[in-house]
Image (cartoon, rainbow, N blue to C red):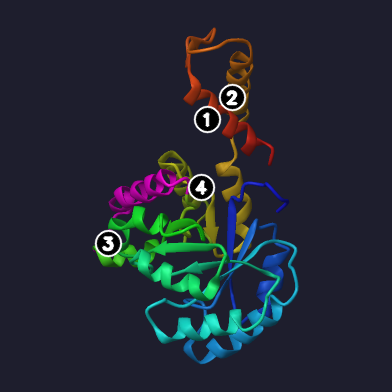
């Protein structure tokens, strides 16, 4: 991912499998997330930490984030000691699972300093506090849902039951000026049709991009979140009109254009540069 590129794909790789991490780094993902939490068995945690620290002693070809273990448990403290015992030039950010309070993040920054932090909201309490968590400090660069844990906490069986929480997190992020959140993972790596439908729904709710658990999911996610040719043409027409006129106006097709519409068109064109 080049500087200034809007990330659309975030690929998880288990921290105790350097071979899979190496493949993830050349998969085309915008950001690679080395996972020390769910993907690593309890008896492999130490190995995952040491392998990850060794990897990150050097800069990497794409930004690498590390998902540490839950902050309210002893494993997270060991993760942070390993990651911050010495400078790691390859560490671009931390993914923080099961965040429930802005206070957790405030305390954490005493150790992590200016390292970018991304909070995962995985419970009803976390969703209720989404705005406060998003606004916890300048080190917070994003929030996102952890839908598997949230689904269990809410007792939700149908996917639509998560839509209120999804919209809540999107609004909370944008309210404090953070980028639109990336969607949570689609857990069935064979279900590409379902992934496409889910991405379309997420895009309609205001998400931007998605986390993945297998490289085969990446091209579909990128396509789903890039603007269509028609959307680009519409955005170009809006920007051209804004360059020649001032104030609100109507385009030849009858569409009303004001400052907010122009801002959205410019964001569409910025995203289209990835095509």
Q: Are marks 1 and 2 in contact (CB under 8 Å)?
A: yes
Q: Which residue is mark 2?
A: 235
Q: Nearer the viewer, mark 1 or mark 2?
A: 1
* Magenta-colored span: 155-180
Residue lying furthest bottom in this view? Answer: 43
| Label 4, label 3: how far apart the Cα atoms are | 22 Å
In the structure shown, which secondary structural element does the residue marked by tag 4 occupy?
loop
| Label 2, label 4: how far apart the Cα atoms are | 20 Å
| Label 1, label 3: how far apart the Cα atoms are | 31 Å
The answer to whether 196 is drawn above or below residue 69 in the figure is above
Of 105 and 156, nearer the camera is: 105
Does the stretch in magenta take in 161?
yes
Question: What label sits on residue 85 in the rendered view?
Answer: none
Q: Is residue 187 visible?
A: no
Question: What label sits on residue 124 in the rendered view?
Answer: 3
| Label 3, label 2: how far apart the Cα atoms are | 37 Å
Q: Is residue 115 visible?
A: yes
The tag earlier along the polypeptide, 1 or 4, is 4
Q: Position of residue 51 (x, y in %)?
A: 65, 83
| Label 1, label 2: how far apart the Cα atoms are | 8 Å
In the structure shown, which secondary structural element does the residue marked by tag 1 occupy?
helix
Circle 3 Cα neighbour tier, 10 Å, few/some/many (<14 / 14–19 / ≥20):
some
Q: Quadrant of residue 21?
A: bottom right
Q: Are marks 4 and 3 in contact (CB under 8 Å)?
A: no
The tag earlier along the polypeptide, 1 or 2, is 2
The tag earlier along the polypeptide, 2 or 4, is 4
Q: Nearer the viewer, mark 4 or mark 3?
A: 4
The answer to whether 247 is drawn above or below residue 16 in the figure is above
The answer to whether 19 is drawn above or below residue 179 in the figure is below
């Amino acid at each position: 991912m080049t500087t200034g590129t809007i990330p659309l794909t975030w690929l998880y790789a288990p921290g105790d499998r350097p071979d899979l991490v190496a493949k993830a780094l050349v998969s085309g993902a915008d950001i690679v997330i080395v996972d020390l939490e769910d993907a690593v068995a309890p008896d492999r945690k130490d190995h995952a930490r040491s392998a990850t620290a060794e990897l990150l002693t050097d800069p990497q070809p794409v930004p690498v984030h590390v998902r540490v273990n839950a902050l309210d448990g002893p494993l997270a403290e060991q993760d942070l000691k390993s990651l911050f015992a010495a400078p790691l030039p390859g560490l671009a950010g931390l993914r923080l699972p099961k965040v429930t309070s802005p206070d957790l993040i405030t305390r954490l920054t005493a150790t992590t300093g200016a390292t970018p932090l991304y909070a995962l909201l995985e419970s009803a309490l976390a969703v209720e506090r989404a705005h406060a968590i998003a606004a916890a400090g300048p080190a917070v660069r994003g929030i996102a849902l952890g839908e598997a844990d949230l689904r269990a906490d809410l007792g939700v069986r149908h996917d639509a039951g998560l839509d209120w929480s999804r919209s809540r997190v999107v609004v909370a992020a944008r309210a404090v000026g953070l980028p639109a959140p990336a969607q949570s993972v689609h857990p069935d790596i064979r279900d590409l049709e379902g992934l496409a439908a889910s991405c379309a729904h997420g895009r309609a709710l205001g998400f931007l991009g998605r986390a993945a658990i297998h490289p085969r999911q990446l091209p579909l996610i990128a396509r789903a979140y890039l603007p269509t040719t028609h959307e680009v043409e519409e955005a170009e027409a809006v920007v051209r009109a804004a360059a020649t006129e001032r104030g609100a106006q109507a385009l030849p097709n009858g569409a009303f254009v004001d400052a907010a519409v122009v801002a959205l068109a410019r964001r569409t064109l910025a995203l289209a540069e990835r095509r």
